[in-house]
Amino acid sequence: MAIETSGRSAEHVRLLEAAEGALVGGVPGLFRLPDEIQLVVREGRGSKLYDVDGREYIDYLLGSGPLILGHAHPAIVEAVSRQAKLGSHYFLPSEPTIQLAQKIRDAVPCADLVRFVGSGSEAVTAALRMARAFTGRDKVLKFEGGYHGTSDYALYDQKPHGSAPETTAHVESAGIPKVLGGEMLVAPFNDLETSTRLIAEHAGELAAVVLEPLQRCVVPTYGFLDGVLRVAREHRVVTVFDEVVTGFRLAWGGGQEYYSALCDLAAYGKALSGGYALAAVAGRREIMALSDPRIAGRDEYAVLGGTMSGNPLSTAAALATLGELEKPGVYERLHAIGNRLRDGLVAVGEIVGLPLQAPGEGPCFQPLISEHPVTDARAISRGDLAATYRFGVELVRGGVLLSVGTKMYVSTEHTDEDIDRTLEIAERALRRVRG
């Protein structure tokens, strides 16, 4: 790749070139900004991120969501520093790990027991494994457009394929065993008739229904979640909420509390630990107990674990994070400032003369240039995705960082001044897109 040098220091260019030579794709994971705005980070503080040239960005990427308290929050820094002096890893129970499990159990409506893992992908994988162990069935129903990480069972239909009410599962990664395609069922989100029909028709072979209660930026329509949960319960199909994004973000009890919907198992990550590597599965005792190492060797035992799972450094960070989030008024303010930004973006679109929407909820939403109401992934695909992408690029150029073309996350550290500045930059960016 030819590194874009305009406006960058020699040191910044050197680091970008070094990344290209040492990291796959020049980045640590699967996310990469467009070449013309790719950057190397120096530090983050509060709601701001700074590249190695010292340029400031108002950060709505937030590490892809974990930094709900912003960068380097003092409570997290202090908790991690204190724990680091006592050791970072034991592979045995420790006080912060036990306390965190208790706090998750008390906060999460479906939680009787908790199992820690290393990432959101692992958490969803673990939940589906326990569902298959519990039911003795293999198939999984997911919803078109839903993102559930990078496991073999997850990488199907994360974007729409065709227009039929139900679709043949479409694999979206090389290296996935072809046989798994026959184990996946796919329905459109917010289509209760198709979803419940598929559950009933395949009940004898269906282990689980997995869904995000807020699917990326698509809000569930009235009765959809309740209807899916009710029919799955009637057919003894395990319901799995992927709350990696919504957990401890939409409300203290996550999407289950926010949408008043009780599932069997739920996967948590991102906001749980404020930027440290940690995720969890929580759920009904009789299902979770299938991963108890004391039953190892039995046919029903579901093997779940990882060397670093629930390490005290990450759980100390999580306890500090949740300690801040459970303070009075935090979620009210998080929604208020996020909704102020959402409403402001829509108003900017009206001023400029482009149909800019901001579907989702206050703490997490997606700017989208479209005239179509956003009810599912297909509705998103009918928007002007090229213009939406250009809008995202122009935002980053202007000093507003986000995942270009997709979501924006809001933290407790974003201020009214941040929102005002963001909307000013957004208007200039949108005018450039229109021009």
Image: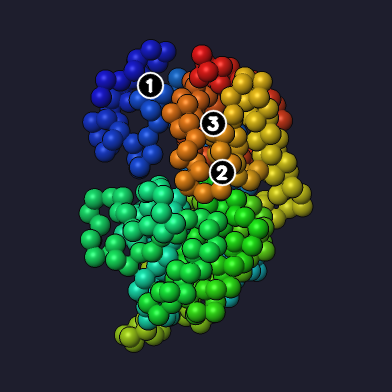
- Residue drawn where x is 60% and y is 50% of the image: 219
* 328 sits to left or right of 121: right
Q: Position of residue 232 (x, y in %)?
A: 52, 73
In the rendered image of this protein, does residue 394 appear above or below residue 285? above
In the displayed orientation, state which residue is furthest to the right: 328
Q: Label 3 amino acid?
A: Ile
- Residue drawn where x is 47% and y is 55% of the image: 188
Q: What residue does disc 2 label?
A: 374
Disc on the earlier residue, 1 or 2 = 1
Q: Label 2 amino acid?
A: Val
* Of the two numbered discs 3 and 1 in the rendering, the one whose residue sits closer to the viewer: 3
Disc on the earlier residue, 3 or 2 = 3
**Which of 201 and 323 lies nearest the eye of the viewer?**
201
State the quadrant of the N terminus.
top left
**Which of 185 and 52 lies nearest the eye of the viewer?**
185
**Which of 374 and 433 lies nearest the eye of the viewer?**
374
Verify CB contact (< 8 Å) between mark 3 and mark 1: no
- Residue drawn where x is 43% and y is 28% of the image: 386
